[in-house]
């Protein structure tokens, strides 16, 4: 009987795996059909940037297409594509077609804007058009030589605002008490749980960094459109450029007309007789074209380690930070071909322990080769923690950083369970604190004391690392810490960052510190292919073993991966006898 059940189980497992294989094989065939076409860039092509997709720091291959049809283009891939387009004889210019543009973070737009500015040095044109401009879309469009819009559209230009929603009243109605332990009067992440409006400290810091971000936006627009920042503020104050004719009169745009007229102007610019002959190539597709390799490639490399997402406990993933980032830094540090490391960070923070683990590897790597940090949209709290030990730190003026502070939230849902749901709890324990930090009762005085000690210790460690890494006094770090966030511009003034710039500038600095004339870029963590992602989703199949009929142990991952390439295997008696 035991052998019978064993055989049934083996065949059941084999059947499940075969179904998975068939599904993956089908997905692979469909994907292969869609990607088999090699993009050929025609003569007189125009590189089109629509921004109707998400733009994370680094684009990662997804095992399955998104259910909502959304797509992405990594900022790093976009910048590399723009570099390639500068010298591509088939690309005549760039068309920023922003009618369907998604709103993006300012630091991302600023870095993309800088890449387009660099493209303009090639002498090729950059034009922008939109049915209507959101404020972020106009900020990007303003870098263009010519900015146009539909004659019935509107231009949203009115300044920045920040709104916070507060949950205190809702939590009280639900019977949940959020117990907070923190160090840092500016650590505002917990305020929505305990306040019904901004604290004076949070209002002060938010107003300051919003003003800094807006001033940076105005400076960029002022430079591109040749309009004084004072005049731009006057326009924003009363929304004077809302209608196209007013926007043109105030020099925010160069003209307003319909789509066909826009296409006709583009056709004339590239010497095409008819608009039907215009050749557009989307930036996402263009970014897939392999860059032309130099005849003699340098053996020296610079590693770019991408750390994006929340910092959590465990390995981490494509859009989360974990020990995978520490391993990537360690691998780059121990590779003799890699002469410098650039750590690109886009994170609002998270686990203090994981942050410290990553920082220790940054410090160890720095003893072997230069480590330069590049901040994206946000590098705050744990995002700043992992950066503070680097040789040099770059930030965009519109980066949000700092937030050197620590907090813990312990929800007490006793009233919710007892009074709202009628659920009660009782328990027995072997020791007085066996149920430490239960969410079904208030914290005891001992628990409050222990948590406060932990928070204070973590904060002390945090500011000590920052003081040592940035060559500042702990007193100064504490004065700019307390959980306060800063713009990249203000962070430069107070010593939290060294230079303003994007990923390209950070890479150039790394090359300078490593005395490199030529180099290649390698990116970490290693991107997993679709097959690896699917196997991981199935619960770590890659690490499991199977036993063949001959009694040999064989990695299941290699066995499964080989089956689509050997169809005859599917017709044989199932290999699998047991999984362990």
Image (cartoon, rainbow, N blue to C red):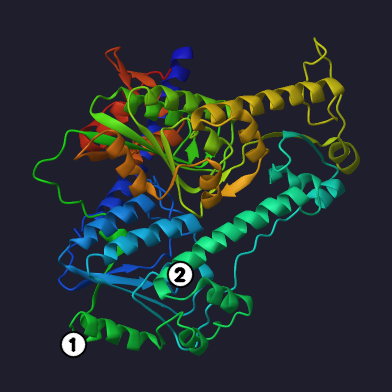
Residue 134, position as x, y percentages in the image: 52, 72
Q: Residue at x 35, y 20 (%)?
A: 546
Label 2: few (<14), some or many (≥20) within 10 Å? many
Q: Earlier in the sequence, mark 2 or mark 1?
A: 2
Q: Quadrant of residue 457?
A: top right
Q: Quadrant of residue 494?
A: top right
Q: Residue at x 62, y 41 (%)?
A: 403
Residue 98 lies, with reference to residue 351, above or below; the image says below
Residue 549, position as x, y percentages in the image: 29, 16
Residue 419 lies, with reference to residue 46, above or below; the image says above
**Closer to us: 449 or 425:** 449
The answer for how far apart the CA atoms under marks 2 and 1 are is: 34 Å
Q: In the rendered image, which residue does mark 2 sit on?
A: 221
| Residue 93 visible in the current orientation | yes
Residue 211, position as x, y percentages in the image: 61, 60
Label 1: few (<14), some or many (≥20) within 10 Å? few
> Residue at the right extreme?
419
At mark 2, the secondary structure is helix
User: CB under 8 Å between callouts 2 and 1?
Assistant: no
Q: In the rendered image, which residue does mark 1 sit on?
A: 273
The reply, left or right, for residue 267 in relation to residue 89 is: right
> Residue at the left extreme?
295
The reply, left or right, for residue 572 in relation to residue 459 is: left
Single out the mark in the foreground, 2 or 1: 2
| Residue 34 visible in the current orientation | no
Residue 496 lies, with reference to residue 329, above or below; the image says below
Residue 45, position as x, y percentages in the image: 21, 71
Q: Residue at x 49, y 78 (%)?
A: 132
Residue 309 lies, with reference to residue 158, above or below; the image says above
Q: Quadrant of the C terminus?
A: top left
**Closer to us: 461 or 156:** 461
């Amino acid at each position: 009987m035991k052998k019978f059940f064993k055989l049934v189980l083996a065949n059941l497992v084999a059947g499940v795996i075969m179904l998975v294989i068939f599904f993956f094989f089908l997905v692979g065939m469909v994907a292969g059909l869609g990607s088999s076409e090699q993009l050929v860039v025609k003569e007189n092509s125009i590189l089109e940037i629509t921004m109707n997709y998400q733009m994370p720091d680094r684009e990662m291959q997804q095992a399955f297409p998104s259910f909502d049809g959304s797509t992405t283009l990594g900022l790093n891939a976009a910048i590399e594509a723009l570099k390639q387009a500068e010298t591509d004889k088939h690309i005549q210019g760039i068309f920023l077609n922003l009618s369907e543009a998604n709103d993006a973070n300012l630091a991302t737009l600023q870095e993309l804007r800088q890449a387009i500015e660099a493209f303009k040095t090639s002498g090729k044109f950059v034009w922008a058009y939109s049915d209507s401009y959101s404020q972020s879309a106009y900020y990007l469009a303003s870098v263009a030589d010519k900015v146009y819009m539909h004659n019935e559209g509107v231009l949203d230009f009115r300044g920045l605002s920040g709104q916070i929603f507060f949950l205190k009243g809702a939590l009280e109605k639900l019977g949940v008490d959020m117990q907070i332990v923190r160090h840092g009067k500016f650590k505002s992440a917990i305020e929505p749980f305990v306040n019904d409006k901004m604290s004076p400290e949070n209002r002060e810091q938010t107003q300051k960094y919003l003003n800094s971000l807006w001033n940076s936006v105005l400076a960029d627009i002022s430079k591109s459109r040749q309009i004084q920042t004072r005049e731009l503020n006057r326009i924003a104050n009363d929304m004077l450029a809302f209608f196209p004719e007013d926007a043109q009169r105030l020099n925010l745009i160069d003209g307003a007309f319909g789509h066909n007229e826009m296409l006709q102007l583009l056709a004339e610019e590239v010497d095409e007789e008819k608009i039907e002959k215009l050749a557009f190539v989307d930036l996402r597709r263009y970014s897939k074209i392999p860059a032309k390799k130099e005849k003699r490639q340098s053996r020296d490399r610079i590693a770019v380690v991408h750390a994006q997402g929340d910092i959590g406990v465990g390995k981490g993933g494509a859009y989360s930070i974990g020990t995978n980032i520490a391993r990537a830094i360690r691998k780059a540090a121990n590779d003799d071909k890699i002469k410098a490391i650039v750590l690109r960070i886009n994170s609002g923070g998270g686990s203090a322990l994981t942050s410290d683990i990553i920082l220790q590897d940054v410090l160890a790597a720095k003893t072997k080769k230069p480590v330069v940090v590049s901040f994206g949209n946000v590098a705050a709290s744990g995002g700043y923690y992992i950066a503070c030990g680097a040789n040099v730190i770059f930030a965009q003026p519109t980066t949000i950083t700092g937030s050197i502070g620590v907090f813990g939230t312990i929800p007490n849902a006793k009233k919710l369970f007892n009074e709202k749901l009628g659920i009660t709890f009782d328990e027995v324990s072997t020791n007085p604190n066996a149920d430490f930090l239960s969410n079904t009762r208030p914290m005891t005085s001992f628990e409050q004391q222990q948590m406060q000690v932990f928070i204070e210790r973590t904060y002390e460690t945090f500011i000590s690392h920052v003081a040592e890494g940035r060559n500042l006094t702990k007193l100064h770090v504490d004065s700019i810490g307390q959980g306060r966030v800063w713009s990249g511009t203000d962070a430069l003034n107070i010593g939290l960052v060294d230079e303003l710039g994007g990923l390209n500038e950070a890479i150039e600095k790394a090359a300078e510190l490593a005395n490199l004339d030529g180099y290649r870029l390698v990116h970490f963590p290693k991107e997993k292919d679709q097959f690896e992602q699917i196997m991981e989703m199935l619960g770590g199949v890659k690490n499991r073993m199977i036993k063949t009929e001959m009694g040999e142990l064989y990695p299941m991952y290699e066995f499964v991966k080989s089956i689509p390439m050997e169809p005859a295997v599917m017709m044989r008696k199932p290999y699998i006898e047991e999984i362990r």
